[in-house]
Image (cartoon, rainbow, N blue to C red):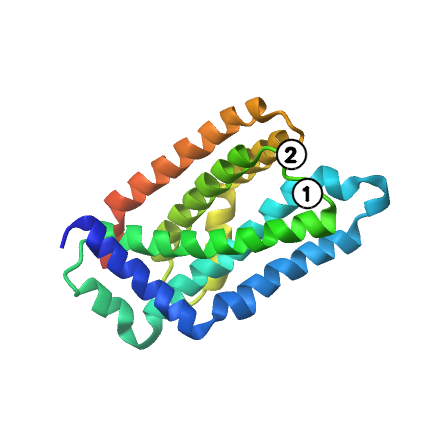
Amino acid sequence: MNLVQEASLVAEKDLRIELRSRVTVQQILPFGLVVLLLFAFALDPDRGVLRDVAPGLFWITALLAALLAVSRSFAIEVEHGARDGLRLSGLDPAAIFLGKAAAVTIELLVLETVLSVGVVVLFDVALNAVLPLVLAAVLATVGVAATGTLYGALVASSGTRETLVPLLLLPVVSPVLLGATRGWEAAIDGVPSEAWPWIGLLAVFAVLYTSIGTLAFGTLLEDA
């Protein structure tokens, strides 16, 4: 099998596990919706505050949900020695990284689709320029998934994985939070031309961490 086939195999495995366990649907998705609902209650919609800060609130919610998805992705490998089986499977470590990152990306994109509907309903936001919104969402999600997979592998065997992942990941993905928020603000305000520089930043971040993960994942897998 080539790299793409091996990566597809790993992604399919992770997604099949999630479909059977329904953790994403029953826990992560409700968590994201509850966070959005809390924001709606905490801020005053009569003054238009929610509409102004909706992009930032959306991406903060998506990032918090991503932490749960990344932790879940490696928790299933630690159980019953599955991580050792994956390491001894003969699959290319780069393919394992790409497959796990792809699975997390797909899960987050589904989550973000539902959350965007929640933003429209709860925050009274009109999604005007669709193309910049979609591109920013996809690139930001790929960047978060690649970074999360990389750092998730780094702390997978640690007993404090649930606290270490946020501690390591949140400072690193701050450019993603900034770029995605600014890109969405420009698109929602009807000025898509101002979104493209931020989309470029998201693309650079996604390519950078995908490349680093592809090269370094084998070492992290062996050391952990």
Element assignment for label 1: helix
Badge 1 amino acid: Ala
The residue singled out by tag 2 in the image is 188
Q: Residue at x 64, y 40 (%)?
A: 55
Question: Which residue lies at the image location 46% right of the left edge and 49% below the top edge?
Answer: 168
Please state if 56 lies on the left or on the right of 132 as rendered.
right
Query: Which is nearer the eye, 177 or 12?
Result: 12
* x and y, in percent, of residue 138 in the image: 46, 42
Q: Is residue 81 visible?
A: yes
Secondary structure of the residue carrying tag 2 is helix
Q: Is residue 185 above or below residue 115?
A: above
Do callouts 2 and 1 mark residues in contact (Cβ within 8 Å)? yes
Residue toward you, 166 or 51: 51
Position in image of residue 205 (x %, y %): 41, 35
Callout 2 amino acid: Ile
Mark 2 Cα shell of 10 Å, populated few (<14), some (14-19), many (≥20): many
> Which mark is on residue 150?
none
First in sequence, mark 2 or 1: give its number.
1
**Distance of mark 2 from mark 1, alpha carbons?**
10 Å
Coordinates of residue 204 in the picture (x, y in percent): 40, 31
- Give how far across and how far down residue 4 sits, in percent: 22, 49
Q: Which mark is residue 54?
A: 1
Q: Quadrant of the C terminus?
A: bottom left
Q: Is residue 88 left or right of residue 44?
A: left
- Residue 154 appears anywhere in the view: no
Query: Which residue, as the protein is rendered here, is positioned at the far right?
Result: 46
Asked if residue 224 lies left or right of residue 42, the reply is left
Q: Quadrant of the N terminus?
A: bottom left
Which quadrant would residue 156 be assigned to in this image? bottom left
Instruction: Tally the marks.
Output: 2
